[in-house]
Image (cartoon, helix red, strand yellow):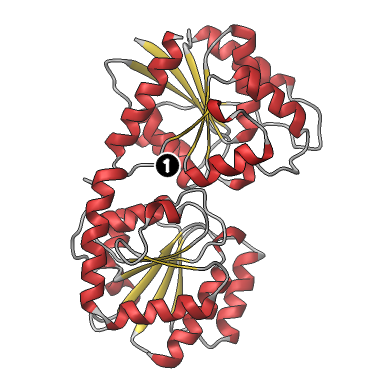
Amino acid sequence: MRTILHLIETTGPGGAESVFLDLATRLRRDAYRSIAGIMGPGWVHDTLVDRGVKPLILPARAAEKKAFNFHLYSCLTGLCRDHSVDLIHAHNLGLTVYAALVGLTLRLPVISTLHGLIDIEAGNRYRRLKSLVLRRGLSSLVVVSEHLRERLTAVGAVPADQIEVIYNGVDTALFQTRADRALRMELGIGDEVILAGSVGNIRPPKAYEVLLAAAAMVAQNSRRIHFVIVGEGSDPLLSTLEQQRRNLGLEGVVTFAGFRRDIELVLPSFDLFILSSRSEGFSIATIQAMACGIPVVATRSGGPEEIITDGETGLLVPVDDPHTLAAMILQLANDAGLRKRLATAALHSVGERFSLDKMLARYDALYRRALNS
């Protein structure tokens, strides 16, 4: 049995964190012993504990403006020795650099998964030094979409033959098509109202200000559509969006529902799923919605173009274009036949391309290749 050390520095809910958790807790138990290294308390910690994995707390990584964190490097090196680690798998760029250095020191294979454009920005500090470490210290670099592979190759951080695309997967047994009225009852919304939902933490790349602008246009044409934004948010952005909602007169039209742990129960309450992002590495929430049999309108923000076939498994619109987004929302709301056709095709596509089993199998093959080499 081989020991895998899984590393991530972010502690809250999100797509990268969901992949990390699935890999750390759902790999083949007959082949791997998984250890999870995280940076502190939060949703990731609690979910690991709920799934029967005791996380190891790592020392906080130094801020970008500070010197190299030798304490973190030493801690990771000691952890690998103490637990007889055979392979390190790090998520996102920050810990990947440290993992690659530890791999070089201990001659261990290291795999990294990058989940978004923030990890591969050309202007990242110390980019040349980090690129050198990655080239020398990584066995494989995984990205979650072809779009990210193209961007990473363009900035020249890592050779193209060192990069592999593995799409994120979801547990299709968990996200199923079933009617659920819990959220409607909670919000006091009747069955005659079309519930248009979006899921994702309130961050600038999600472009929720664009969704609010589209919601205002929709409300001018139909008052039977209610919008729900589910995701963790904080000031100043959350306050800015709430002020925009007031300015547009959308208090009774748009609900900020906050972070929810029961997303597999929330999604089936939606009649439509909306992704308004201007930048997406992949978008797990989109495939979760598709797995629930919900028709999707998403922006051409990177990852969604590889998930959705426009007009067949969902609808794609330009980024930062509230007029087109509003038009597509209205089209779906007014055409039950279109909603059903898109949802049926999307459900089939998720099962074929984006299941959790397929993702785990791809990583399993990558681990075996790295360990055997």
Q: How many marks?
A: 1
- The quarter of the picture where the N terminus appears is top left
The answer to whether residue 216 is visible is yes
Of residues 177 and 349, the one nearer the viewer is 349
Residue 358, position as x, y percentages in the image: 30, 35
Identify residue type, mark 1: Ser
Residue 136, position as x, y percentages in the image: 65, 17
Does residue 174 lie above or below 112 as drawn? below
Of residues 99 and 145, the one nearer the viewer is 145
Does residue 286 lie above or below 198 as drawn? above
Q: Which quadrant holds residue 193?
A: bottom left
Q: Residue at x 47, y 41 (%)?
A: 144
Q: Is residue 313 left or right of residue 328?
A: left
The answer to whether residue 26 is visible is no
Give the residue number, with chain letter if any, for mark 1: 18
Q: Which quadrant holds residue 204?
A: bottom right
Does residue 366 lie above or below 114 as drawn? above
Q: Secondary structure at mark 1?
A: helix
Residue 52, position as x, y percentages in the image: 34, 29
Q: Which quadrant holds residue 209?
A: bottom right
Task: Check the image and name the residue furthest to the left.
Answer: 178
Of residues 51 and 219, the one nearer the viewer is 219
Of residues 357 and 348, the one nearer the viewer is 348
Residue 344, position as x, y percentages in the image: 21, 61
Q: Residue at x 27, y 73 (%)?
A: 185
Task: Check the image and name the residue furthest to the bottom.
Answer: 220
Q: Residue at x 40, y 34 (%)?
A: 48
